[in-house]
Amino acid sequence: MEKVMELPVQFTASAIEELQRLMQEDGFDQSQVLRVGVKGGGCSGLSYVLAFDQAAPGDEHFTIEGIPCVMNPAHGLYLMGMEINWSTGLEARGFEFINPNASKTCGCGSSFAV
């Protein structure tokens, strides 16, 4: 039985638009869901995970603007309240993570410490 949770993270309109675009590409595996999480590593200790993946037993499930998402319940401690944005700036293009739980982030914004 899958556990449905409150929204642990928020996506900006630009992030939702980019995720929906990716999901509409030819060859996208419709059985995949968006995994939001963390993993050990990176220059600040933890790195963000944002990738399409298969749901795993024990994952918590939530939906944002029709996008099915999963998260390992242990990762909520690090990500609760985080905002994910899609940036198309000249210096950086990609997903940005604005995490109120991070005590330190690296210059590239993809790793953090708590």
Image (cartoon, grey):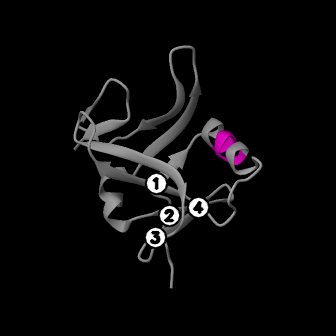
Question: Could you classify mark 2 by the number of other residues whose Cα lies within 10 Å: few (under 14), some (14-19), or many (20 or more)?
Answer: many
Q: Position of residue 11 (x, y in %)?
A: 56, 45
Pointers 4 and 2 in contact (C-beta within 8 Å):
yes
User: Which residue is the site of mark 4?
Assistant: 33
| Residue 111 in which image quadrant | top left
Q: Is residue 101 visible?
A: no
The residue that mark 3 highlights is 60
Left or right, residue 85 beside residue 43:
right
Which residue is pictured at 44% across the width and 71% down the height? 59
92 within the magenta span: no
Q: Which residue corresponds to mark 2?
A: 70
N-terminal of the pair, mark 4 or mark 2, is 4
| Residue 57 horizontal/vertical position (percent) | 44, 77
What secondary structure is the stretch in magenta mostly built from? Answer: helix
Q: What separation in Å lies between label 4 and label 1 (alpha carbons)?
A: 10 Å
Residue 77 at x, y = what percent?
30, 57
The amino acid type found where label 3 is placed reads Glu
Would you say the residues marked 2 and 3 are in contact, meaning their CB atoms lie under 8 Å apart? yes
**Amino acid type for the residue under numbered disc 1:** Val
Q: Amino acid at mark 4?
A: Val
Residue marked by disc 1: 36
